Each structure stands twice: as structure tokens, then as C-alpha cells.
Image (tube, coloured by chain):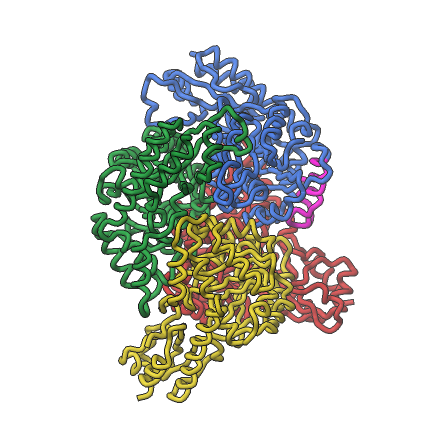
Chain colours: A red, B yellow, C green, D blue
């Protein structure tokens, strides 16, 4: 009954096999090895982006921050959702790498940026007082969002049209978003300037790829990557992981499994008294739980997180709790059913 | 008919006289002169703060930024109103000095921070994920606000009580706020950790004082001041200005004049078809004007600014315009009446 | 007997008169006033640089830092002399504004950068490991140097030729250097990308001009200036000071006086037992003094600074002390002779 | 004949086995897993430091930079050797993390910091002008040095005594230094405030440990680690590598192998015409090679790097080339002999 986070699950066996296979002899360091070269070709094909540049990374936070710093001057504004990981969960990594750039966090009815809110925020900033104001520079979206909802390509296109700014996508759960929407990698990325492609949460060990669709960002990104400590000497081990993860669409297969388990959980939770708080598009479910229901499951060993809650209030018997459940590639139907049973009886 | 900003007005003659008087012989540099020493004593008395440290500065932006950077680690959150000068008009100075600290801009019904909104924002941030989240560090208020409203000491006290965080006050128009509320300097500052005391907009030439009520901030503030380029070699000329400005309550006399002229303007504007958008507590008036009314005054040479407006829309005949009028110490009744006449006939 | 620093001297009466003259009526804020416009034209003429951009500032440190940050990426190297003000006396302002840029401090036989040392340092850095190494970006020279020596235009040209990098000149004592070398403003600046032109130490109150000979630096410089808190609202008062200072070559007249007084002092010091440590080109003299000689003058009220000395060693009777004497525009022959007398008898 | 770098060698099989063993079931994220707990205990024992804090990392650069930023304010000076990795090979990571702190690079006769040079540099900085000067904050040493020499504990103690500043050790090749000097981990670290312990170059995949001997650095270090993107979600895989690497002294066994191979190479090189440039204490050899000798080996497929050389000069037949040879844990006697043969015949 481990639904705490997809980053608590193990790596997929094929990823480990790939590591072992890559562990032969000497390899050129700092991402000049043949695995990284092959990964670059593979992603250029997948994204139909022959000029894209690809960098193996071990950290989603580092990837997001170095990409945004490359896209924005220190006096730039990067727009994001108020629940974005870069805004609430990276202790200011983006403003640190960006030497003071501003993240403007937009509120919205759901967990996706609303084009109207984006347009309004940009218009307000553009009406600012010349050199006194910061300059609209970039938009950052997260797909899946932090609340498990998916953007469609049309929704991303609407944001691109609305903002006319370079767009970054935090794809910590990119494969889950692809499966949720049923679109191709190319369709999901054609509006993007940069992508953080995460494998860690879906079967990798510590494997992310930074993708620059705009090659003009190369010097700035490579500099920020280096200064941040993300130019890995033995990069072959990261690239090998991602290659194995992409091979034969393993990434989509694993995402399909975790998405399906989340859907099964969503359905079941509704039946036992939980109330879904967001659309369960991918592998994360947010549900409001009566406190007694939470206490019962906790007592039976269920593992998941309460969200946005002052835990000093948990004793208050009146308010339902907002709980987050994350399914991973290794979650089974039996796991889901055991959790549901813990809530039910 | 110059109502563009109080920073377009000249310095008061007594301020210039003080400069001339201070221009005798040699003086110890870098704020170790006798004028700065006297200023420190004077402000300690006014604020009933015998341990306060005082620094002559030439820039409100530099003062605000160096103070906030001293009050917050790079991973701290400083809360402010969404219209605060530090948020919208300093091109990210606070996040620059603060090495990536976050300004969290709070919306509100008027131009003052609402205690409830502040409490909610802090609670949300404190419910964040440990080291992943930024840390609530400081509150920054502006008095007068950017829309000309005054906080009372009770309102500042409510924010201090609500936040239990060190508080900074951007006092670019501090003297106007004192006159608006009729309270003493001590009453207005007793909750504060730091103060940016501005004389520039009310009769000074380029004269601000940074005040540390919390002497533990000394090393950090002095370091940021030095690195920002605000440790003036010939500081005597700034301190001499502020001393003259405080003498015989000149600062309050000048603020009373500008506040009164703004009140006169507010009353008159309402009579000729303007609609006040904020309470006219001090020396700034915001009013919605029918477009024809604006065009007429503009044609007659009136100088004031439109605010938060996409100027490409000015031709649209349907929406009223939001206009800002700022009275200064040198604004006369004749100036106000001329402006009102430009609107009226 | 005040020879502590030229920044302890008062402003010249004509500078104060200009302030009074400028203190009439309303003026457009933030360096859009007519004094700043006139100053721009004046400096374009002087430097024969019709595209140069000019900004009134109140701080040499802020000017230097914002200029270097505009000339170099955060991963750039700016070369300077190991005694440069930016290296030893600005508490890291340049690396702060430059978001981590490196100052590479070059040792030399005298207080000027040696072309060979500069070439060697750049060659070493260029032989670095690609993205692992920082990138040579700029050269910063100081004229007069911190030890009172002057660069000739030929010496600056040699550095430009040797480095093929954009050059910044810290001209806190630029007028003294012009007088020392007898060359025109144009000759002294034709190799430069940027200039910090200081009036404060030679008759101004707090008046510097940032000059961009390379207009491509505009956005970056204006952004750093704004974020540093150096976009002055009442800029007219700075520009007016500098205009008065330039008028009828007052700046050169004042520099000639301080240079002459330093020369008189240098000659006299040698005669009474001091040993000059650097060439006395301008208005600063460095001399090694027997400790007894220093003690005697100190006892008679002479004011000057010991330099680069661990003051805990002052009691050691064997080593001579390195003393700095700075003459200012207001230093008289009587002042010099009084100091010499204090040493002599 | 791969002697390019120890980071081109594969991971040791036992490290990979440990990864596979750790790949079971769910684990608590962000270094709260049981492998990290065990690693902490293991290192506390090894270093006889019961209060030490331990953090698994994937990057030596990130580790160095986050540690130094925790040890120094933005206005601090960290002293290092002029050839230190942090100075020449990390594109300013330390000044980036440290918000502008200064690395002061010390020249020396060999690749170790000389206590006299350190004392002199600190004395110079302490004689600076108060708030104008930066503040001596930390010393950073590298052991093995970048030129393959080892510090003994006595040498480190001399630097600690000389500087009286907190000391950081960049231990990218720490195990090689232990073997070179024959001392215990405790003896080598007892003067330290912090340690970057590197396994990557000696059998790991991407595995470093940040060690805080001074627990007061916790909040600052954890914040910099987070903001840098080095708080790994699946930290168990890094800790498991290092545990396997430490078990049964594997780390020392591997270091002994690479040190021995370097010694064999050093001896052989001298015999075939190379001239050793530094003491071959560990697993790196620097030797001056006649150009013909280099060309011959290159033609036979030998892989190693030329150092500090403007490669445009390689054609010049007169100067010998400085070559770096790095042996790794996987280097065999046959490898060494093949390289020597390539030079010899």
C-alpha cells in the first residue's frame, strides 16, 4: 500500500540491465559518449526536431532551473501555475540559477494555466514602467500537472498563442501525460522551446534529459548546467537508462500501467466515500477524505500524503482531508485493492 | 499643472541651504562624519530606539533591497502587496540583492495588505515540503501605499501579530503617512525591524535613510549596502539634507502641504466628473476619468500619469481611464485649481 | 593637514551654485531631464563618440559593477590589477552584480597591468577545458591607478591590442590622469567600451557618469543600474554637478591643482626622509616613512593613511611604513608645507 | 591504452551488484532511506565524527560549491590553490552558489598550498579597509591535488594552524590520497569542517558524499543542495554504491591498484625519455614529453591529455609537451606496459 510518491518505487529491471550492459570498458566523459549520442538521435526522431540538443541529467530540479535561466535574463518574468513544482517545491532553484528572475505564479480554477489568466498577467507586466518593470520572458507548464491533470497539445498551443513567449515544459511525468492524452511526443512538444524529460519517476534510477528545441540556448544552458554541477562525468549511465526506457515504448507501457492503477483507485475511492478533487488523468489522484476514513487506513499501514494541510489541524473532525495518491509503474491491482479495502471496511 | 510625480519637484530651499552649510572643510568619509552621527541621534530620539542604526542613502530602491536581503536568507519569502514598489517597480532589485529570495505578492481589496491574506499565504508556505519549500522570512509594507492610502499603527500591528515575522516599511512617503494618520514617528515604527525613510519625494534632493531597529542585521546590511554601491564616500551631504528636513518639523509641514493639495484635488475632481478609485489619505489621488475629460485636460497641458493601462487602448471611448495625480510640497492651491479648471470647462 | 583622501574634501563652490540653479520648478525624472540630455551631448563631444550613452550616478562602486556586469556573462573573467578598487575595495560588488563573474587579479611590477601578464593570463584561461573553464570577457583598468600612477593612451592601447577584449576604465580620478598625461579626453578613451567617470573626488558632491561607448550594452546596463538601485529619480542634480564641473575646464583646473600639490609634497617628502614607492603622476603619493617620522607627524595632527599594513606591527621599529597621501582640489601650498614641516622638525 | 581520465573507466562490478540489490520495493525518498542512514553511520565511524551529517550526491562540482557556499557569506574569501578544480574547472560554480564569494587562488612551487602563501594572503585581506574588503572565510584544499600530489595530515594541519579558518577538502581522489599517505580516514579529516568524498572516479557510477563535520552548517548546506538541484529523490542508489565501495575496504583496494599502475607508469616513462613534472604520489602522472615521443604514441592509439598547452603550438618542435596520464582501478599492468611500449619503440 505504497502510494506516497512514484519516486519511492524501484527502477525497472530493463533499466538496470542497461546499466550493466553499459558498464564495459572506457567511455568518453561529460556526455561525449556513444550512449548520449544515440540518445540525442533517438529524441530528435521522437520529437521530429533534427536540431534539438540533448543533455543527460540526474535532477529534475536542476534541469528545470538551468533551462529557465537560459530562457530568461535576470530581469525576466517566467509565468507558471501557482502549484508548479518550480514555484513551491524547489526552494527557489529557478530564481537562484536565473540570478533573480521572477516566477509569476498564476492562480486558476484547475491545476492548468488558464490562457486568459496568462494573457492578463503578461498585459499587466507589459503595461509596467519601462526599465522599472521586469520583462515577460518565458512560460513554464507542467504536464502532468502537480495535481495529476494533463494538458492536451491544443491547450499548450492556446498558451503559446496567448503568450507569444518561449515555453518550457516540466515533464517529470511526461510519459504519463502522453498516455493520458494519447498523442505523440511530437504533438506534445511542437510548441516548446525546452523540455525537462523525466524518467526517474517512471522506472529510471536518476535519469532526466534536458532538451533544447531552440539551439540558440546552447551556450547559456551549458554554462548554467556546468555551474550548477550537472555536467556529469560518467554520463553514459544516465543516457543508457533513458535509451532502455524508450526502447520498445517501455516508457509508455510503464506509464499506462501507473495511469491505469490510478484510474482504478479513483473509481474505487469514489465508491468508498472519497471525493475526487481533480480530474484523474494520469497516475496521481487527489481526493478529499473524511477524517475517520483516513485514520482507519493509516492504522492499517496505508502510505500516502496529505496535501496543503496544516497538520496541526488534523485532529479537527469536521474538515475532510486532501490526500494525494501516486501510482507507479510497479503498482499492481492487488496494491490498489488492498488500499481500497483499508478504506472500505 | 505638474502632477506627474513628487519626484519631479525641486528640493526645498532649506535643504539646499543645509548643503551649502555642510560644504565647509574636510569631513570623515563613508558615513563617519558628524552630520551622520547627529542624524543617528536625531532618529533614535524620534523613534525612541536607542540601539537603532542609521545609514544615509541616495536611493529608495537600493535601501529597500539591501534591507530585505539582510532580513531574509536566499531561500526566504518576503510578503508584500501585489502593487508594492519592490514588486512592480524595481526590476527585481530585492531578489537580486537577496540572491533569489522570493517576493510573494498578495492581492487585496484595497492597496494595503489584508491580515487574513497574509496569514493564509504564510500558512500555505509553512505547510510546504520541508527543505523543498521556501521559508517565510519577512513582511514588507509601504506607507503611504503605492495608491496613496495610509496604514494606521493599529493596522501595522495587526500584520505583525498575524505574521509573527520581521517587518520592513518602505517609507518613500513616510512623512505623508504620518500626517495622514496624525501619529508619532514612534507609533508608526514600533513594530518594525527596518525602515526605508525617504526624504527625496518630499523636499530632498536624493536623500533616504536606512534604519535598522534590529542591530543584529548590521553586518549583513552593511555588506549588501557596500556591494550594492551604496556606501557613499561623501555621506555628509545626504545626512545634512535629512537633518534640515527634520528640523522644526519641516518634513511634516511639507507633507501637510502636499496632502492638503491632494485633498483639494480629490474634492474638486469628484465635482467635475472624476471617480476616486482609492481613499485619498495622503498626497496621491487615483481617479477614473471619462476619456473625453482626460483628452481635454491633456490638450490644455495638464501633466499626470495613466496607470496600469495598456495605452494602445486609449482610443477606446467606452472605458474610463485610471489616472494618478501626485501633489508635492511645492504644489499650490493655484496649481490645483488650474488643473480642475482644465477638467471643468 | 588633511591628506586622508580626496573624498574628504568639500564640493567646489561652482558645483553647489549649479545645484541651486538647477533647483527650479519641475523636471522630468529618471534621467530624462534636460540637464542629463545636455550632459550626454557634452560628453559625446568631449569623447568624439556620437553614439555614446551617458548615465548620471552617485556611486563609483555601483557604476563599476553595473558596467562590468553588462560587459561579461556570469561565467566570464574580467582581468584587473591586483590592487584595483574593484578587486580590493568594493566587497565583491562586481561579482555580485555579475552573478558570479570572476575578477582575475594580475600582479605587476608597478600599479599598472603589464601587457605580458595580461596576455599570459588570457592564454592560460583560453587553454582551459571548454565548458569547464570560465571565458575571458573584459579588461578593467584604473586611471589614475590606486597607487597614483597614470596610464598613457599608448599603454591603454597596448592592453587593448594584447587582450582583444572590451575594456572598462575606472576613472574615479580620470581628470587627474588627463592632467598627468596631458592628453585629450578622446585620446584617453578611444580604446574603451565603457567608462566610469568620477567627479566626486575632484570637486563633486556625489557625481559620477557611466559612459557606454558601446551602445549594444544598453539593455543590460540599464537593467543592472535599475536593479542595483542606481536609476535616480532626481537625476538632474547629478547631471548639473557634472556640467558645472566640465564647464570652462574646471575639472582640469582642479585636477591640476591637486596634482601640483601632490608633486610638491613628493618633492618635499624625499627631502625629509620619505622614500617614494610609486611614481607620483597624479594627486596621490605613496611613500615609505621611518616609524619615528610617522609618529612625529601623527603627534602634530597630520592626517593620512597607512597602507597594506597589519597595524598590529606598527610598533615594530625596524620596518618603514607605507603611507598614502592624497591631495585634493582644495589642498593649498600652505597645507603641504605644514605637513612637510610636521615631518621635518 | 586509456589514460585520459579515471572518469572514463567503468563502475566496479560490486557497485553494480549493490545497485541491483538496492532495487527492491519502495524506499523513502530524498535521502531518508535506510541505505543513506547506514552510510551516515558508516562514515561517522570511519571519521570518528559522531555528529557528522552525510548527504549522497551525484556531482563533485555540486558538492564542492554547495559546501563552500554554506561555509562563507557572499562577501567571504575562500582560499585555494591556483590549480584547484573549483578555480579552473567548474565554470565559477563556487562563486555562483556563493552569491559572489571570492575564490582567492594562491600560486605555489608545487600543487599544494604553501602555508606561508596562505598566511600572507589572509594577512593582506585582513589589512583591508573594513566593510570595503571581503572577509577571509574558508580554505579549500584538494587531496590528491589536481597534479597528483598528496597532502599528509601534517600538511593539512599546518594549513589549519596557519589560517585559523574552516577547511574544506575536495576529495574527488580521497581514497588515492589515503593510500598514498598510508593514514586513516580520521587522520586525514580531523582538521576539516567539510569534505567532498568522491567515489565516482574510483569505481562508482556517479556517487559522491557531502560530509559536514560541522553540523551548524546544516540549514545552509541543505538549502544550497536543494536550490542547486542536488537533493536526489532516489538517493538510495547513490548511498548503496558508496556502501559497497567502502565494504571490506574496496575503495582502498581499488585506489591501491590505480596508484600502483601510476607508479609503474612513472617509473617506465622516466626510462623512455619522459620527465616527471610533479611527484607521482597517487594515480595521476604529469610528465614532459619530447614532441616526437608524443606523436609516436598518439599514432599507436594511446589516449591521454596534454595539459595547460595552447594546442596551436603543438607543431613547434622545440618545447616538450606536458602530458597527464590517469590510471584507474581498472588499469592493468598490461595496459601500462602497452603504453610504455608505444613510447619506447
* Residue D279 appearing in the image: yes
Name the residue located 56 percent from the left edge and 31 percent from the top edge.
D141
Residue D39 in the magenta stretch? The answer is yes
Q: Nearer the viewer, residue C340 or D38?
A: C340
Image: magenta residue range = D21-44
Residue D295 in the magenta stretch? The answer is no
Rendering coords of residue A96 (x, y %): 50, 51
B317 versus A269 height, above or below: below
Name the residue located 72 percent from the left edge and 61 percent from the top edge.
A339
* Occupied quadrant, residue D168: top right
* Residue A50 appearing in the image: no
Rendering coords of residue B127 (x, y %): 65, 62
Rendering coords of residue C142 (x, y %): 35, 40
Rendering coords of residue B119 (x, y %): 62, 68
Q: Nearer the viewer, residue A53 or D143?
A: D143
Q: Is residue C241 left or right of residue A64?
A: left
Q: Nearer the viewer, residue B330 or D14?
A: B330
Residue farthest to the front? C345
Q: Nearer the viewer, residue B311 or A236?
A: B311
Could you tell me which quadrant the C terminus of chain D lies in?
top left
Q: Is residue C326 left or right of residue D330?
A: left
Amino acid at each position: 500500500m505504497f502510494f506516497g510518491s512514484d519516486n519511492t518505487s524501484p527502477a525497472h529491471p530493463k533499466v538496470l540491465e542497461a546499466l550493466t550492459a553499459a558498464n564495459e570498458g572506457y567511455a568518453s566523459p561529460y556526455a561525449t559518449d556513444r550512449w548520449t549520442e544515440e540518445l540525442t538521435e533517438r529524441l530528435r526522431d521522437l520529437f521530429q526536431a533534427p536540431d534539438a540538443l540533448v543533455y543527460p541529467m540526474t535532477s529534475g530540479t536542476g534541469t528545470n532551473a538551468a533551462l529557465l535561466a537560459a530562457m530568461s535574463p535576470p530581469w525576466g518574468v517566467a509565468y507558471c501555475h501557482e502549484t508548479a513544482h518550480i514555484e513551491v517545491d524547489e526552494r527557489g532553484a529557478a530564481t537562484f540559477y536565473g540570478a533573480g528572475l521572477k516566477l509569476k505564479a498564476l492562480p486558476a480554477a484547475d491545476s492548468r494555466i488558464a490562457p486568459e489568466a496568462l494573457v492578463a498577467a503578461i498585459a499587466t507586466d507589459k503595461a509596467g514602467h519601462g526599465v522599472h518593470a521586469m520583462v515577460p520572458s518565458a512560460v513554464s507548464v507542467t504536464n502532468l500537472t502537480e495535481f495529476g491533470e494533463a494538458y492536451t497539445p491544443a491547450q499548450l498551443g492556446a498558451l503559446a498563442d496567448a503568450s507569444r513567449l518561449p515555453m518550457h515544459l516540466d515533464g517529470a511525468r511526461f510519459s504519463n501525460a502522453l498516455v493520458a492524452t494519447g498523442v505523440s511526443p511530437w504533438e506534445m512538444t511542437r510548441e516548446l522551446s525546452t523540455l525537462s524529460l523525466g524518467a526517474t519517476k517512471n522506472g529510471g534510477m536518476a535519469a532526466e534529459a534536458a532538451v533544447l528545441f531552440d539551439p540558440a540556448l546552447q551556450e547559456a544552458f551549458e554554462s548554467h548546467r556546468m555551474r550548477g554541477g550537472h555536467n556529469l562525468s560518467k554520463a553514459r549511465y544516465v543516457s543508457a537508462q533513458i535509451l532502455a526506457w524508450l526502447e520498445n515504448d517501455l516508457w509508455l507501457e510503464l506509464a499506462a500501467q501507473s495511469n491505469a492503477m490510478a484510474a482504478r483507485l479513483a473509481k474505487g475511492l469514489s465508491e468508498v466515500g472519497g471525493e475526487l478533487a481533480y480530474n484523474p488523468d494520469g497516475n496521481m489522484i487527489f481526493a478529499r477524505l473524511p477524517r475517520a476514513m483516513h485514520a482507519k487506513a493509516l492504522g492499517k499501514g496505508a502510505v500516502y500524503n496529505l496535501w496543503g494541510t496544516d497538520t496541526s489541524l488534523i485532529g479537527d473532525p469536521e474538515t475532510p482531508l486532501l490526500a494525494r495518491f501516486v501510482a507507479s509503474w510497479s503498482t499492481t491491482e492487488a496494491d490498489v485493492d488492498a488500499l481500497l479495502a483499508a478504506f472500505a471496511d
